Image (cartoon, rainbow, N blue to C red):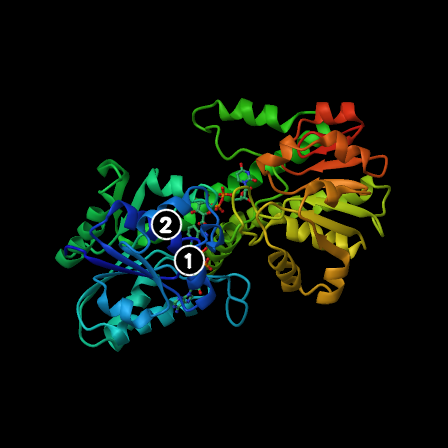
Amino acid sequence: MNIKKICCIGAGYVGGPTMAVIAQKCPLINVTVVDINTDRIAAWNSNDLSKLPVYEPDLDSIIKEARGRNLFFSTEVDNAIDAADMIFISVNTPTKTYGKGKGLAADLKYIELCARQIARVSRQDKIVVEKSTLPVRTASAIKSILDNTGNGVQFQILSNPEFLAEGTAVKDLLEPDRVLIGGDSTKEGKGAIQSLVDIYANWVPKDRILTTNVWSSELSKLTANAFLAQRVSSINAMSVICEKTGADINEVSKAIGMDSRIGPKFLESSVGFGGSCFQKDILNLVYIAKSYGLNEVADYWEQVILMNDYQKNRFSDNIVSTLYNTVSGKKITFLGWAFKKDTNDTRESAAIQVADNLLNERAYIEVYDPKVTEERIYADLEHLNSRNPEENRELLKIRQNPYQASENSHAIAVLTEWDEFKTFDWQKIYDNMKKPAFIFDGRGILDTKTLEKIGFICYQIGSGTKA
Ligand SMILES: NC(=O)C1=CN([C@@H]2O[C@H](COP(=O)(O)OP(=O)(O)OC[C@H]3O[C@@H](n4cnc5c(N)ncnc54)[C@H](O)[C@@H]3O)[C@@H](O)[C@H]2O)C=CC1
Ligand SMILES: O=C(O)[C@H]1O[C@H](OP(=O)(O)OP(=O)(O)OC[C@H]2O[C@@H](n3ccc(=O)[nH]c3=O)[C@H](O)[C@@H]2O)[C@H](O)[C@@H](O)[C@@H]1O
């Protein structure tokens, strides 16, 4: 099928950037991104490009080029589905918070609603593409809904998981390591796969477009995220041993990363991984393994999450014990709230858990993050339900610059690796802090030698405190 019109359901961190790049690279295809969230769609349509709902380097210029030409953002979901030859489902698939599989399984209610809506609205044959991350074999559920509740039109289901990382979404989309497309081996299935291959082939080299069966594609996405998260937990586990033994995690990372079988990437020790997907996808994998009675496999992957929780908690524990076993009434400055640099996304950010632990110890926190909004930070805390919203607002304040956030502070905690933190006037920060002035660098980004010369007492993940 020669695709002329695409609809993408879900204008989030994946739907927005992914469709923007498809629209930019395929000017002859009309791409409409729809969402039920009217505020989000309004923000995507904003003339002020700094107000786009997703912050990603270079995304604004792509939106500027394609929006209004062949890229549209709309809340008219039915119309866009009806008009499209190909529909991407890019809605959220969070961890279930109720019923069977609570706390582990992926909640597929949004996916099912999409499938039912597509079935109800469609009046001609369509290709439906799973872009969301889904448990293996979800495509069969989508197919069953489409075939049983539709108007007799034919649907082909493809799995096309997204591998972009936030903060580098545009680069990852323009130069992907690979594009994965899973589909049926029937004639119609192969035709659908080819239609999607043809779209990506507009900018992705053919040898990077991989086609597989649907189940392999669905499972490869969960596997990739599990392996990546496991690498972070592995290096974080070693960071604790480094702190006990005098080894330095950066030196260890470098030494092992030079082994071409291990490779140098994704070996940065941190206060713990965050983001909307690693934890959710591993929990989902754990649930799938358990549902097949594979308890050893489930335990193996669960350990990656337990290690990550440990890393976050030990960071806050260390702050408390270093500050003479009490932070009650002491001011602690948080540099960063986002789960990684170059994004405004805070989902599952380590900062949230660390803040909650310190607030439980009655610390007073002031946060500076260059991209995260005040409402987002309070919403993250409220979501935990640890104390009432007024208390959160009393105990934690958001500041627009690091100097204000660190005035009269007992300690600074680096939670996100924003580049700008390296260029602050650290002497000025030191001068205005309580003494001794502590820095807890949860990202290993600061030059501790220079800071120690100024007078700071520095702790760095994986190398410990040098007083
Ligand atoms: N965030 C990321 O970096 C990545 C996410 N993924 C996966 O992609 C999927 C989407 O993730 P995000 O974009 O981060 O989620 P998101 O939460 O940012 O966006 C999802 C959007 O779908 C909309 N939506 C939900 N149900 C809808 C419906 N019935 N009709 C219309 N709109 C609807 C929501 O209003 C929301 O705006 C998830 O399965 C995730 O695991 C995959 C790779 C990367
Ligand atoms: O499915 C998803 O949502 C995406 O999840 C991750 O992308 P993302 O979570 O956006 O960002 P990462 O760069 O993977 O970082 C995840 C977390 O791990 C942390 N991390 C990463 C690398 C590292 O060496 N150390 C480390 O602590 C980051 O700071 C961050 O908190 C994957 O990298 C993407 O391929 C995938 O598409």
Asked whether, in this view, residue 224 is left or right of residue 323, the answer is left
Of residues 69 and 159, the one nearer the viewer is: 69
Mark 1 vs 2: CB contact within 8 A? yes
Residue at the extreme front: 47
| Residue 285 horizontal/vertical position (percent) | 46, 54
Question: Can you say which quadrant of the picture contains the C terminus?
Answer: top right
**Residue 69 visible in rendering:** yes
At label 1, which amino acid type do we have? Trp
| Residue 24 horizontal/vertical position (percent) | 29, 47
Quarter of the figure with residue 456: top right
Circle 2 residue: 63
Marked residue nearer the N-terminal end (1 or 2): 1
| Residue 223 horizontal/vertical position (percent) | 42, 47
Q: Is residue 77 above or below residue 187?
A: below
| Residue 383 horizontal/vertical position (percent) | 63, 63
* Mark 2 surroundings within 10 Å by alpha-carbon count, few (fewer than 14), some (14 through 19), many (20 or more): many
How far apart, in angstroms, are the residues tagged by discs 1 and 2? 9 Å
Of residues 174 and 280, the one nearer the viewer is: 174
Circle 1 residue: 44
Residue in view at x 43 percent, y 58 percent: 46
Say which element carries label 1. Answer: helix
Residue in view at x 51 percent, y 53 percent: 276
Q: How many marks?
A: 2
Q: Is residue 190 above or below residue 244?
A: below
